[in-house]
Every structure is written in C-alpha cells, then in structure tokens.
Image (cartoon, rainbow, N blue to C red):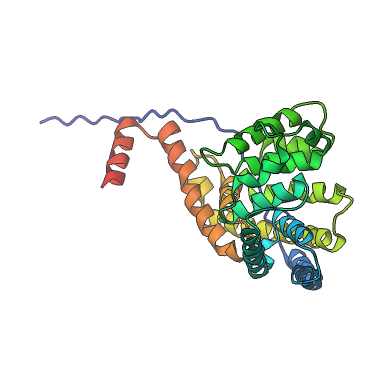
C-alpha cells in the first residue's frame, strides 16, 4: 500500500491597499485634553443660561424668536434647549393656525418659519408663499434683490411634497438665482451644493458657524456658545476614537486581519453621522464597532477568500 502526500497551496488574490492615513493620530488623548474638555464645559454653562433666557423672553417678538430658534438648531445646539424649542414652536404654530396661516414678515422670515415647522413635523401649508407670487403662479422678480431670502426659500422648497406646485416653482426660481452671477455670500454658494437639512449635522454646523459670524445681525453670545460647544465636541470625538483605536489594537485586528483595510476613523465618522449629540457617545462607539465589520467582510470577499471558502461563509450567514 502506497501513500501519496500532496501539499496544496491556496493561491489568493490579495488586494494591495494603501496604508492607513490616520496611523496613531488619536493615541495621544490624555490628561491635558480631559482638562480642556472640563474647561469648555465651565465656559459653556453660563452661556447656555443666557441663550435659554433669550428663548423664554416673552418681550421678544415672534419673528426674532423664530430666527433665534433657527440659529440654535443650525449651530448644532438644539439638544441643550429641546424642551424650550418644542414649547415655543407649539405656541407659535397655534398662533399661526388661529391667523389662518397668514404669516407676516419678509421672504427670509416666512421661508425660515416654514422650513422650521416642517422639519419638526408640523403641517405647515405651502400657501404661505402665495403673497410672494405675481398672481400667475410665478415668484416676483423683485425678490432676487434679497439674497438671504432667496437662500431661505431654496432650502424651504426642499421640504415640499408631491402636488405642491408653488414649491416646485420656488425651487426652480431659487435655483436659477443661485446659479447666476448674483450670489455674493459663501452661504448662498454652499446652499446650492446641498440644502442644510440634507447634510451631516455636525459638518453643517461647522459651515454655519462661519456663515453666522459673517452675518452682521448675529448674536455674540450664541456665536460664542456655538464655537465652544463645537470645540468641546471635537475633543469628545477624539476621546471616542482613542478608545476605539485602543480596542482594535487590543484585539490585534491589524495582525490577525492583515488582508483588510483599517477603517477605524471612517467607521466612527459613519456613526457620528447618525448620532452626533454628546449624550450618544456610547451609542456612537457601539455603532462604529458594528460598522467596522463591513470593510472586514468586504475585503475578505473581494481580496482574500477563495470561492469555496466564501461559499461556506455565505452559507453560514444564511443559516
């Protein structure tokens, strides 16, 4: 009886991925960063109370208060004033219903209020824009002299639903304006690329801080609060990345899974797009860990496993 031994070599098509550009960028989070986070919190607290006082100030007119609410939300601060904002919007909407949705104010204020109410789920009718048309369903050309109002109209029109022809016309009208040579502000140019409510909230807040600072009518307290909060959140995200990176190193993913790309930062960024608020720090880390599985499986299927191995793996998932 003869025995024949064969040594089969598995040939794999390995992907030649570039090295991780982040390296150990987030490994140096330490005592100094923790102290700075605490300092930010101490600076933020009194500013929060000043803004809260403005929100509950009954002497402030409705249009000004709605602009304040819009600023708070677009600067990424709404989670500090959620109760106050909901209460104010309920009150303002009841008043608007009582007036048969007859909104005073210029194009900017009406479009801003329309967008704010719809984003919060209120049934705001598109008929509030009728007063800005010429009676033939077309918007008045004189409105193009108000760039701020046109940007506000453009963003409001993105919240239209099927059958709202006036908002279809509003989007065409505002888009034509924004694509012309007339817009002079960075906010107008940015809006054309993407309406604010369609973007990643934290990135949109980053852009809006700069836009708000350029606005001569900005509130200094609100602007300062937004800057401090943005910086504090940046440190919090760095802290999460530090913990996430350490968790991956402890499990030796780079050594055990040398055929896959390192997507630690990208996974956290995806999670941040879903939950950016400070109270969801733990959720971000958990979601980031789950998302990290995607590139591991993707690269295993695309650039490592043999057909037979992947068939077994797929069958295991199916079971």
Query: Percent from the top left, x then y, of residue 132?
Result: 72, 40
Residue at x 47% of width, y 52% of height? 290
Location of residue 5 (image quadrant): top left
- Nearest the eye: 2 or 83: 83
Location of residue 80 (image quadrant): bottom right
Residue 118 in view in this figure: yes
Would residue 297 appear left or right of 134 to someone viewing this image?
A: left
Residue at x 77% of width, y 72% of height? 58
- Nearest the eye: 85 or 272: 85
Would residue 23 appear left or right of 282 to someone viewing this image?
A: right
- Nearest the eye: 127 or 202: 127
Would residue 163 appear left or right of 6 to someone viewing this image?
A: right
Query: Percent from the top left, x then y, of residue 66?
Result: 73, 58
Residue at x 55% of width, y 58% of height? 285
Q: Is residue 219 above or below residue 273?
A: below
Query: Percent from the top left, x then y, of residue 202?
Result: 67, 51
Residue 251 in view in this figure: no
Number of numbered tags placed on the structure image: 0
Residue projecting furthest to the right: 216
């Amino acid at each position: 009886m003869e025995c024949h031994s064969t040594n089969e070599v598995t040939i794999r098509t390995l992907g030649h991925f570039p090295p991780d550009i982040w390296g150990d960028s987030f490994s140096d989070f330490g005592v100094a960063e923790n102290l700075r986070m605490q300092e930010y919190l101490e600076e933020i607290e009194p500013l929060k109370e000043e803004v809260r006082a403005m929100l509950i100030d009954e002497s402030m007119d409705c249009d000004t208060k709605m602009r304040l609410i819009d600023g708070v939300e677009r600067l990424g601060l709404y989670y500090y004033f959620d109760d106050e904002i909901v209460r104010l919007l309920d009150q303002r909407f009841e008043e608007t219903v009582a007036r048969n949705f007859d909104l005073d104010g210029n194009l900017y204020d009406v479009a801003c209020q329309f967008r704010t109410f719809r984003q919060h789920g209120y049934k705001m009718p598109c008929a509030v824009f009728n007063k800005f048309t010429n009676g033939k369903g077309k918007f008045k050309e004189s409105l193009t002299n108000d760039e701020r109002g046109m940007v506000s109209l453009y963003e409001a029109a993105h919240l239209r639903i099927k059958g709202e022809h006036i908002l279809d016309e509003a989007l065409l009208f505002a888009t034509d304006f924004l694509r012309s040579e007339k817009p002079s502000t960075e906010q107008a140019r940015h809006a054309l690329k993407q309406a604010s409510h369609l973007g990643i909230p934290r990135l949109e807040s980053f852009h809006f801080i700069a836009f708000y600072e350029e606005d001569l009518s900005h509130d200094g307290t609100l602007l300062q609060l937004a800057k401090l909060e943005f910086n504090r959140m940046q440190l919090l995200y760095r802290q999460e990345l530090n913990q996430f990176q350490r968790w991956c190193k402890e499990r030796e993913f780079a050594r055990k899974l040398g055929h896959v790309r390192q997507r630690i930062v990208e996974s956290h960024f995806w999670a941040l797009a879903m939950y950016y608020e400070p109270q969801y720090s733990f959720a971000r880390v958990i979601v980031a860990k789950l998302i990290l599985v995607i590139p591991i499986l993707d690269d295993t299927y695309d650039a490592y496993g043999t057909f037979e191995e992947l068939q077994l793996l797929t069958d295991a998932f199916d079971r």
